[in-house]
Amino acid sequence: MKAIKYILISLTLLVVIACAHRDIPQKAQTFLDKYFPKSSIVLTEIAVEENVLEYEVWLNDGTKVEFDMQGNWRRVARKKSGVPVEMIPAPIMQFIHENYPGNVVTKYSWKDYGYKIELSDDMDLRFNKQYKFIEEVD
C-alpha cells in the first residue's frame, strides 16, 4: 500500500510543468494586468489540483494566482498585503468589515458552492454564489 501511495505521489509531482508566462490564456493575463498592474510574473506552472489541470502563477510580490485552463481565476493568495479588495464583491467585503474588523483577506477562492475567504487571523469564511454568508471555519 505504501508503494502505491509513493508511486501516485511521484506521478503527481511529475505532472507539474513549468511554462513561459506568455503561454497562459489571454483571459488570465488580463486578470493579472487589472488586479496586479505593478507586479510581474516570476514563475508559471501547469499543475494538477483536485484531478484538474490548472495554471499556477507566482508574482514578484509573493502573490500566487491559480487559473483553470481557460484562464478563469480559481484562487488568489496574497499573505503580505492582502488580496485586492476590488476583486472581492462588495457584500462580502461589507460583511468582513462589520464582523471581522482589522482583518484583510489573504486568500480568496472560487468554489462550487460560491466563495471561500481566508482572513489574516486564519479564520475561514464561506459565502454562497449570491454573496450570502454560509459559515465560519476556525
Image (cartoon, rainbow, N blue to C red):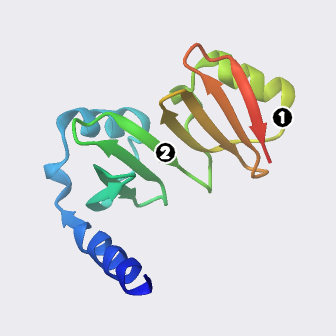
Sequence-wise first label, 1 or 2? 2
Residue 10, image quadrant = bottom left
Foreground residue, 16 or 43? 16
Foreground residue, 44 or 128? 128
Q: Is residue 134 above or below residue 22?
A: above
Q: Which residue is drawn at 29% across and 59% down?
A: 47
Q: In this view, does 103 lie above or below 85?
A: below
* Number of numbered discs visible in the structure rendering: 2
Q: Which residue is drawn at 47% across and 58% down?
A: 61
Q: How far apart are marks 1 and 2 (CA)?
A: 20 Å
Quick one: SS at disc 1?
loop
Q: Mark 2 points at which residue?
A: 76
Pinpoint residue 75: horizontal percent, then vertical percent. Answer: 46, 43
Q: Where does the N terminus fall, quadrant-wise?
A: bottom left
Pinpoint residue 117: horizontal percent, then vertical percent. Answer: 64, 38
Q: Residue 81 carries which label?
A: none
Q: Which amino acid does label 1 sit on?
A: Tyr
Residue 70, image quadrant = top left
On screen, residue 72 versus residue 114, left or right, reads left
Pinpoint residue 94: horizontal percent, then vertical percent. Answer: 73, 20
Question: Farthest residue in the top direction?
Answer: 130
Q: Are marks 1 and 2 in contact (CB under 8 Å)?
A: no
Quick one: SS at disc 2?
strand
Q: Name the residue under label 1.
A: 100
Q: Residue at x 41, y 48 (%)?
A: 65
Crowding at mark 1 (Cα within 10 Å: few <14, some 14-19, many 20+): some
